[in-house]
Image (cartoon, coloured by chain):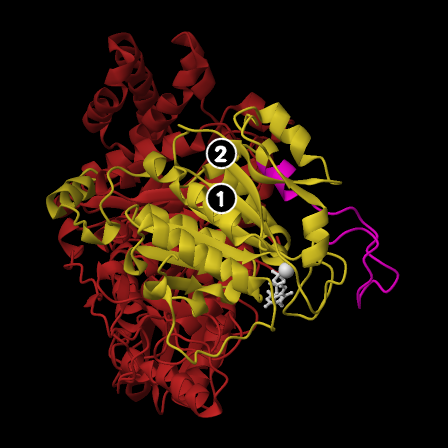
Chain colours: A red, B yellow
Amino acid sequence: MRRFTEGVSIVLGGSAGQGIQTVEGMLVSVLKREGYRVFACKEYMSRIRGGSNSTEIRIGNDAPSAYVKRIDFLFALDGDILKHLESRLDDDTIVLGERERVCHDAKRCPVIDVPFGRFATELGNPIYTSTVAVGIVLGLLGIGKEVLGEYIREHFSRKGEDIVAKNIEAAGKGYDFGKHMAYDEGVEVSFGRDESVKEALLLSGDQALGLGALAAGCDYISSYPMSPGTGLLAFLAQYGKDFGVVVDQAEDEIAAINHALGAWYAGARAIVTTSGGGFDLMTEAVSLAGMIETPIVVHIGQRPGPSTGLPTRTEQADLNLALYAGHGEFPRAIFAPGTGQEAFMLMQQAFDIADRYQVPVFILSDQYFLDSLTSLSENSLEIRPVERHIVETEPEYKRYALTESGISPRGIPGYGTGLVGVDSDEHDETAHITEDAAVRVTMHEKRLRKIIGLRTDAIKPSVFGDISRAETVVVSWGSNRGVLEESLRILGHEDVAGLHFSQVYPLAKQGLKLLSGKHVIVLENNAGGQFAQVLKSEYGLSAVDTILQYDGSPFAIEDVVTNIKDMLI
Amino acid sequence: MIDTHRYDMPNGTDIAWCPACGNYPILTIVKQAFAELGISPDRAVMCSGIGQAAKMPQYLRINYFNGLHGRALPPAVAIKVANPELTVIAESGDGDTYGEGGNHFLHTIRRNPDITNIVHDNMIYGLTKGQASPTSSKGMKNPIQPNGVVVEPFNPIALAIANGATFVARANAGDIKESKEIVKSAILHKGYALVDILQPCVIFNKINTYQWFKEHTYYLDENYRSHDRMEALRIAFDLDRLALGIIYQQAGAPTYETLVREGNDPLHTRHFEVEKLRKLITSFR
Ligand SMILES: Cc1ncc(C[n+]2csc(CCOP(=O)(O)OP(=O)(O)O)c2C)c(N)n1
Ligand SMILES: [Mg+2]
């Protein structure tokens, strides 16, 4: 007898092109509509067909929000996936698949035979395999037959009644099979539902950022494709038209960011999206933005480097890159979302801060975050009014007028009667080139002063647990929010609290109070402890421990729990 | 006499060009073309890269985006898209446009935005003190190739025509009157317009002097059919005698800004409907 009352981890694995994405999409939607809290994440190879890819779907009572290594059910679509996931399988894992496909040696086959393909063929077309598979999973869990029917009607009605009917039949066959199998294997699943989840949104990191960009009044994106940064470009290409967003696929990343700067200069609100390698090419223009004080928002979807690295995997090793990109000295701000809600909010914040302070602003995400799906409540997505920080110019207008805050009112060409010049050479208040040392010092200090306001406006970190009592504080940034929150819940240790930073530079001063005198452990996906260094330099902390991982996969909850325990002794 | 005073900088403005530099007549050409077309300085933007030529927007009254070496074209394209009501000029040197910015040159031509690209072609890197540029003639001695440039020069005119540019012209900085007419036509052209202006560099380029340009150029006559692409290419490949005037012109091609956006309103005047966004968000249930 296998009973699942807290949660379950289901993994679908096979080769690229076998329809895992379709199964995942249907399953997750149906589960959410039934009121189950779900989380899904994926890992895949850098190829279009073949290889071994897998998607993990977690259902749980306590809002699952991170990757676990444990696999309760593995749906294996081919044999290679067993080898690929070997280290994650144990005696408790129930492996399901078509025996003749999965096992070369039928005698020693640990796989429960599930004939997805045969059912589909009986229905006249292998394309129903995905629907059969969804039916089987739901049958096994004893969940959602009706809702699956609804979902099929909604999504397939365009293709005609026959297709709808066939898919419903496929789903039914799968469901009944799954139900019997659960009985035969003694599987029983029962966990909590939440009515509010039925109405919740189901968003990937990409989608949350894309919606956030629309909410921010983004009206221009120029980019060059590079995984995993491309999703945001594709999102705005798909949905941006109704919002008047200009979408431009540039000839290279250098063009992309120079387009974006031109667009901002002329009054638009522009973004570029890329990954570390593409961003390398943009760095000269980041420095340009610092000098001409034209706002810019840059999204970097991180993946493991150096160089081409692991194109489809995850890492958080481009924090230093964003922090130091561009020659010379100039202020900037860096955000890193850890939830869909943070992504939506930070996009708006990024545009506002870039516009208000006329500095480059970065959003650092990663493959794991961008590809993960979670449910979140619609009310948690606040749409703030778009404030355009531009002024109508007059004949005497000076683009770089000296001010106490360092922020010169930003005019744009064609709005007002003044002239708006920007210059990459050192310049005076009127944007004219100068080599006067005194003017240089004045202008440099004016630009650098903006960091004071940026620091005051920095977003406070989020606290998990009772931080005032805790001796140890585990720190996360960006995509590790979920894994930290869940790990601490599992650990249930009063002496350990968590602190999550969604703004990683400059740091809000409140964080220092929360961390001083504590045993600080930083959790990050890189080898150098890059955020640990930022904590030291920003807060002056002397000793910071780290839990680091840089194998291209996200942290698993099990590993984080063990690691934290080991560090408590 | 054309009155260009509305574009003039105040007396005493320090100009970083050498005496007798070919950039001075180009400045005059541009100001006169603006004046005759009645372009208001506050409705026009000049984008430039880095180099002696690229300092141009510093020396006249206009909105300007003086960005990075090689990157005059990308901001120019985006400015036109963000506000199609502006007259947008990208103005830079031969090294800037054809060397460092070569990829933008290729792909901006393909987009055909309604901008004018004026290239000060002195066949040398002036600002960095006389190295070869993409258009330097083969054999030209310079500090980096003391025995002379070893490769054939870049042919911007032929490349632009072959790549689908809708307006391609060559002018001579030494002839203000004719060059001004060419620049005017380029600005009036709806679409990407290239004007490669032959420009003497009196300090570093001892080959391509005012005199040399006079001797090696001729004007296309009235009978020349600038709409004939093959004929234009033939003219473009003639490097012994460099043709001056509008070498190729094609009217009616759609411009980039009309392809990627609707209307002519500056983007900053737009507001999205919050209700529409709410609806889109709800669709992700
Ligand atoms: C990225 C970068 N590389 C190199 C330079 C140095 N640099 C400045 S101008 C220039 C060449 C300019 O040649 P051209 O565009 O023909 O202009 P000219 O000075 O001849 O008018 C170079 C190499 C730079 N400023 N930026
Ligand atoms: Mg030159």
Quarter of image, res A517: bottom left
Q: Amino acid at mark 1?
A: Ile
Placement of the C terminus of chain B among the 4 image quadrants: top left
**Does the image show residue A274?**
no
Q: Residue furthest right?
A: B147
Query: Was residue A172 drawn as part of the magenta stretch in this picture?
Result: no
Q: Chain of mark 2?
A: B
Q: Nearer the viewer, residue A531 or A517?
A: A531
Residue shown at the point (24%, 9%) measured from the top left: A161
The N terminus of chain B is located in which quarter? bottom left
- Spot occupied by residue B192 in the image (x, y as percentages of width and height): 46, 40
Question: Crowding at label 1, few (<14), some or many (≥20) Cα neighbours within 10 Å?
Answer: many
Please tell me which residue lies in front, A325 or B89. Answer: B89
Which residue sits furthest front?
A: B1
| Residue A63 horizontal side relative to residue B161, left or right | left
Please report the bounds of the magenta region as a residue range. B135-160
